[in-house]
Amino acid sequence: MRRAPIGDALSMSFSKIVVGWDGSPGAQSAAEWAAAYAMGAPVEIVHAIGGRARGSEYLAATGERSAERIALMELADGLRSTHPGGSFATETVRDAAIDALGQRLANDVLVVVGGPTRRRSRWTLGARLAGRPTGGSVAVVPVGWASAPPATLVVGIDGTREARAALEVAVAEARRLDAAIAVVHAWDVPAMPGIGFDEYPAESDVDMAERIHRDLLDDALEVARDLGAEPEGRLEMGRAGEVLRRSGGESVLLVVGSHGARELARFFLGSVSHGLVVDPPAPVLVISE
């Protein structure tokens, strides 16, 4: 089983955590991760069931919805037992999950959902939530993830405003989780006008591109140090999604920014963030302003 670290109680970037619950293994992992991650912040577990309400549905002890409600209450009781002092509330709502959870997105609220058991769709619940143009932060937790001693938090940066927001959250969360922080910037050899597919840019052009990206990473490291962190910088050649998947696979948390509000062609969520939340290598936190 893959494992993620848990730290001690310090101030966090979010005042409340909302967990999407549907009884699946992914939802179970999300709830357990959120309970440990919250460190005293209130956790609301929301079960969206859709359809119209029927007055007698929850009064029937043998009814399907009644059984689901009991399972939800048992989940909360179990989390209270394993996390004494934690604040856990449950709510069952008549709405689609994307709407029920989307309505709860806010600057100071973290919405947590489980990753898919199998990668069957490019538009999982986590991807759709993280891509909503209204903003808000979403964490997607892989199935089977559990707590372990602190390790490294990884944050991907690319010089954008969204990446700066992700970096600020990553520094705060690494401090709270008592984890080291690695700032990762991926770069690739730029396409050059007039160069064929079987040709390679001149060495001087590649060196210049690398220096530009190195400066971008150094700027991010300086920001992190100004925020009180002692970051490790990683400049890695390759596609950003592949680099972050490789770097973040063993991390406590992989933090990225969402560029979705500006990129309609990517259906609201940037392609790098999208690939990571559809098939998360670790708990992935997408920061959207």
Image (cartoon, helix red, strand yellow):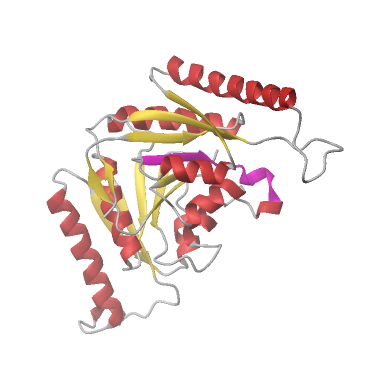
Say which quarter of the image contains residue 249: top left
Q: List the single residue furthest toward the right.
A: 194
- Inspect this view and state whether residue 160 appears: yes
Who is closer to the viewer here, 205 or 96? 205
Residue 258 lies within the magenta run? yes
Q: Position of residue 207 (x, y in %)?
A: 67, 23
Q: What stretch is highlighted in magenta?
A: 253-264
Residue name at image x 34 percent, y 59 percent: 143
Picture coordinates of residue 22, whole percent (x, y): 35, 67
* Quadrant in the picture for residue 211: top right
Q: Which residue is drawn at 57% across and 46% down?
A: 272
x, y (%) of residue 89?
26, 54
User: Quarter holding the N terminus?
Assistant: bottom left
Query: Percent from the top left, x then y, of residue 177?
Result: 29, 33
Residue 211 drawn above or below residue 286: above
In this rendering, position of residue 218 left or right of residue 228: right
- 182 is higher (above) or lower (below) than 139: above
- Which of the two residues, 261 or 4, is positioned nearer the viewer here? 4
